[in-house]
Structure formats: C-alpha cells, structure tokens
C-alpha cells in the first residue's frame, strides 16, 4: 500500500518503525520535545517523550511548540530520498542537518532555548525520518 508524504498515515508508519527498532537510536540523547514539521503550508505536530513518539497530529499553532522545522516539499524530498543527491559522485543521501545548513529547510522557534533544542534533536530526527526510506510512498 502506497502512502503519501506528508500524511498522518506516513508519519504513523515512521513512528511504528521507530518502535520496532528502538536500538536505531542507541548512542543518541533521548528526545523530549513538542515540535512541528511544516511541509509547504501543512503543519504536523509531534510529541516525543524519552525518545518515543507519543503523539502525531495535523494542524496546530506554531507558537505552542518548542520548535518547528519548515520548508517546501522539495527540501523534505532531499531528506527522504534513498539515493545519492546532486552533491557529487558517490555522495550519500542528504541529511537533515545538511538540508538545514543549505537553507532548503529552516529551524523556527520563539526563543533561543527552542533553537538549541532543535539543534540537539537533529540526529534523532534524522533517524526517525530515515524510517521512511524503506517505505513505499509518493509526494502530494
């Protein structure tokens, strides 16, 4: 069954992937955050408690969140792509950190503490989003 990115079903599949393989985050600090992913104009809100994704909802208010990672669908495609990007021969898939650094996605927060939490969460969120590389999905 093919899913669409972004969608509640796909994010739930990512959550299930993380639950099925908790060792994939070994060595990373647990993630305790209430944050959002903005894909084009769509906001998806996530709550992580100790590294477990406890809630996913569509919609909400960015002002209520610790931080938001936001950008156009094209930026998110770079992160979710399973194959090499245009960075040169043999280069691996783009990372969340590199896509933020390149400006294709941005970190937004109401305060410096939220920005710091976001920066400390990038490695964990990378692992979470990588669960999607094994799924069959298309883009909205």
Image (tube, grey):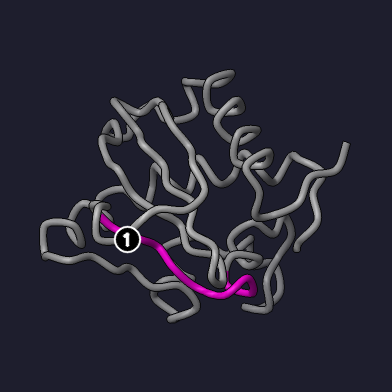
- The residue that disc 1 covers is 62
Q: Position of residue 108 (x, y in %)?
A: 29, 68
Q: Is residue 95 above or below residue 45?
A: below
Relative to residue 41, is residue 64 drawn left or right?
A: left
Residue 30 position by quadrant: top left
Q: Which of the image's four quarters has the N terminus? A: top right
Q: Horizontally, is 61 left or right of 32 in the view?
A: right
For the point 66% across and 44% down, the residue is: 132
Residue at coordinates 48% horizontally, 38% vertically from top-left? 56
72 magenta-colored: yes
Side of 85 where 60 appears, left or right: left
| Mark 1 closeness class: few <14, some 14–19, many ≥20 residues within 10 Å | some
At x 28%, y 57%, the residue is 67
Q: Relative to residue 95, is residue 135 drawn left or right?
A: right
Q: Position of residue 41 (x, y in %)?
A: 53, 70
**In the picture, residue 106 is in which quadrant?**
bottom left
- Residue 102: give x, y in percent of width and height: 45, 80
Identity of the residue furthest to the left in this view? 112
From which residue to which does the magenta span run? 67-75
Q: Nearer the viewer, residue 113 or 81?
A: 113
Local secondary structure at mark 1: helix
Q: Position of residue 66 (x, y in %)?
A: 23, 52
Query: Would you identify the image quadrant in which residue 113 lies?
Result: bottom left
């Amino acid at each position: 069954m093919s899913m669409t990115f972004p969608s509640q079903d796909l994010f739930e599949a990512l959550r299930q992937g993380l639950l099925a393989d908790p060792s994939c985050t070994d060595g990373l600090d647990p993630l305790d955050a209430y944050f959002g992913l903005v894909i084009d104009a769509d906001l998806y809100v996530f709550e992580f408690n100790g590294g477990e994704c406890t809630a996913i909802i569509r919609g909400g208010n960015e002002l209520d969140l610790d931080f938001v990672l936001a950008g156009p669908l094209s930026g998110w495609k770079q992160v979710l792509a399973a194959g090499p990007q245009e960075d040169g021969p043999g280069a691996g898939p783009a990372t969340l950190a590199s896509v933020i650094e390149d400006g294709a996605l941005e970190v937004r927060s109401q305060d410096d503490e939220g920005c710091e939490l976001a920066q400390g969460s990038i490695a964990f969120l990378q692992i979470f989003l990588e669960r999607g590389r094994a799924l069959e999905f298309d883009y909205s």
